[in-house]
Image (spheres, rainbow, N blue to C red):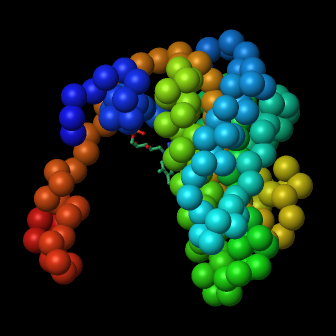
Amino acid sequence: MVASDHDTLSGIMQRRRSVRRYLREIISKELVDELLKAAQLAPSAGNLQARDFIVVRDPNKKHELALAAYGQFFVAMAPVVLVGCANIVRSRIAYGQRAELYAVQDATIAASYIQLAAEALGVATCWIGAFDEKRVSSSLEIPVDIRPVLMLPIGYAGEVPEPRPRMALSRFTHQEFWSSEGA
Ligand SMILES: Cc1cc2nc3c(=O)[nH]c(=O)nc-3n(C[C@H](O)[C@H](O)[C@H](O)COP(=O)(O)O)c2cc1C
């Protein structure tokens, strides 16, 4: 990767970390809107934009989310939690069997955009995938066929984690066909 400048995409990607400790400082509505605008720019299957985000600020709701996430209480310590949902209903307008897969991809790509935008704007996130979907749906009144697939606690960083190791390119890259070498 090329040299990392503070504001280049490369620099932003290299700086991003999963942060699990947040300051109490308020996250403004304007900042959340900037993050949602980044989500809006993400590609989506057939441009159906089959993903929705629920903005959660209520402490009781955040506590319920942390419990649904098997006791990951740092989730409740973030000023805002964004819950990314696959909108399978919207995806079904055009897609049959692949509707759910596309909606999940739409939601996850949008969340990736949010993570990078957050880094660029000086706020921290952590992708949360380990949670009981039924509990989250019941807590946030999410209808059937809308699937919560991830949560992103958002806050100013209260820690600076070390970078996590990554596999060598050769370990996850296959040339021309699947080869198990190095896997
Ligand atoms: C699909 C997915 C699910 C994840 N679930 C959790 C989670 O439930 N709790 C958590 O603390 N981190 C979770 N993470 C964050 C990863 O642990 C983290 O991205 C990984 O260790 C690499 O660290 P980095 O994000 O700082 O580069 C998840 C990440 C992804 C992509």
Q: Nearer the viewer, residue 134 or 113?
A: 113
Q: Is residue 4 left or right of residue 66?
A: left
Q: Is residue 82 left or right of residue 7?
A: right
Residue 168: percent from left, percent from top: 16, 51
Residue 133, placed above or below residue 1? below
Residue 112: percent from left, percent from top: 52, 47
Q: Is residue 161 visible?
A: no
Q: Quadrant of residue 57?
A: top right
* Residue at figure coordinates x 76%, y 61% from the top left: 134
Residue 107: percent from left, percent from top: 62, 57
Q: Nearer the viewer, residue 183 or 30?
A: 30
Residue 49: percent from left, percent from top: 68, 61
Q: Quadrant of residue 127?
A: top right
Please tell me how many numbered marks the rendered image carries: 0
Residue 85, placed above or below residue 155? below
* Residue at figure coordinates x 49%, y 27% from the top left: 120
Which part of the image, by quadrant, shows the N terminus?
A: top left
Residue 154, placed above or below residue 102? above
* Residue at figure coordinates x 31%, y 23% from the top left: 5
Q: Is residue 20 left or right of residue 152?
A: left
Q: Is residue 103 visible?
A: yes
Q: Is residue 115 left or right of residue 59?
A: left
**Extreme-left residue of the structure:** 181
Q: Quadrant of residue 121?
A: top right
Residue 34, placed above or below residue 96? above
* Residue at figure coordinates x 71%, y 21% from the top left: 27
Q: Nearer the viewer, residue 12 or 167?
A: 12
Which part of the image, by quadrant, shows the C terminus?
A: bottom left
